[in-house]
Image: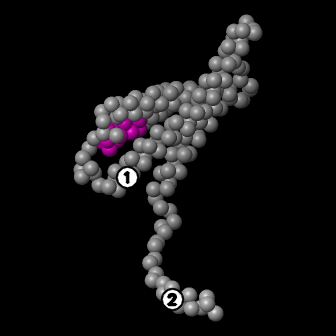
C-alpha cells in the first residue's frame, strides 16, 4: 500500500476507530481521578499516534532502511492493534444499537426517556459492554505480544533419515 490515497484511507479508518474506542475509554474512566484520567488519555493517544506513525514508516520508508525482522514486528503490531480495536468496537456498536433501540422505544411508547437506572453497587449495561469490549480487545492484543516471545523456544533439529532401511523392514 504505497499509494498515498490508500494510506490516507487506512489512516482515516484508524483515526475514526481510535475516536470510537476512545469514547468507551472515557466512559469506563468516568469515576477515576482527573490525574488518572489524564494519564489514561495520554497513553491511549500516544499509542494511537505511534501506530499511525509506524504505519506511515512501514508504508513509505525504504525497505533497506528497516531490518526485515523489525518490519515484520512493526507490521504485525500495527495490524494487531487495529484488529484489537476493531474487535472492541463490535461490543461498543452492540451497546450503541441497544441504546438507540431503547431511545426510539422510549420516544414512541413512553414519555420516559431516562437512561437506565443502576442498581445499588452495580454498573449499567453500557459500562459493562464497554469494559467487556476493552477487555476483549486488549486480551487479543496481549496474546499477540505474548506470541512474539516464543515462550517455548522450539528448536528444529534436522535428522537425516535413511528411508531404504525402513522400507526393507516394512516389506517383511
**Location of residue 10 (image quadrant):** top left
Q: Residue at x 45, y 34 (%)?
A: 44
Q: Which residues are magenta?
A: 47-59
- Label 2 element class: helix
Asked if residue 75 is positioned above or below residue 87 in the image, the reply reads: below
Q: Which residue is mark 1?
A: 72
Number of callouts: 2
> How crowded is the residue under tag 1: few (<14 C-alpha within 10 Å), some, or many (20+)?
few
x, y percent for residue 56: 32, 38
Q: Is residue 93 visible?
A: yes
Q: Residue at x 35, y 34 (%)?
A: 6
x, y percent for residue 122: 71, 29
> How crowded is the residue under tag 2: few (<14 C-alpha within 10 Å), some, or many (20+)?
few
**Location of residue 61 (image quadrant):** top left
- Quick one: quadrant of the C terminus? bottom right
Tell whether position 23 is magenta. Answer: no
Q: Which residue is mark 2?
A: 164
- Quick one: quadrant of the N terminus? top left
Asked if residue 90 is positioned above or below residue 112 in the image, the reply reads: below
27 on left or right of 39: right
Amino acid at each position: 500500500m504505497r499509494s498515498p490515497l490508500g494510506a490516507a484511507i487506512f489512516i482515516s479508518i484508524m483515526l475514526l476507530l481510535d475516536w470510537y474506542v476512545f469514547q468507551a475509554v472515557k466512559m469506563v474512566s468516568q469515576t477515576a481521578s482527573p490525574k488518572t484520567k489524564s494519564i489514561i488519555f495520554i497513553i491511549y493517544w500516544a499509542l494511537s499516534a505511534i501506530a499511525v506513525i509506524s504505519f506511515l514508516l512501514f508504508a513509505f520508508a525504504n525497505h533497506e532502511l528497516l531490518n526485515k525482522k523489525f518490519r515484520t514486528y512493526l507490521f504485525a503490531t500495527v495490524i494487531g492493534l487495529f484488529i484489537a480495536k476493531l474487535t472492541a468496537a463490535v461490543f461498543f456498536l452492540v451497546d450503541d444499537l441497544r441504546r438507540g433501540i431503547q431511545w426510539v422505544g422510549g420516544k414512541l411508547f413512553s414519555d420516559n426517556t431516562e437512561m437506565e437506572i443502576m442498581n445499588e453497587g452495580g454498573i449499567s449495561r453500557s459500562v459493562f459492554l464497554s469494559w467487556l469490549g476493552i477487555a476483549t480487545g486488549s486480551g487479543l492484543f496481549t496474546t499477540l505480544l505474548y506470541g512474539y516471545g516464543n515462550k517455548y523456544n522450539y528448536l528444529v533439529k534436522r535428522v537425516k533419515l535413511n528411508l531404504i532401511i525402513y522400507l526393507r523392514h516394512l516389506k517383511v
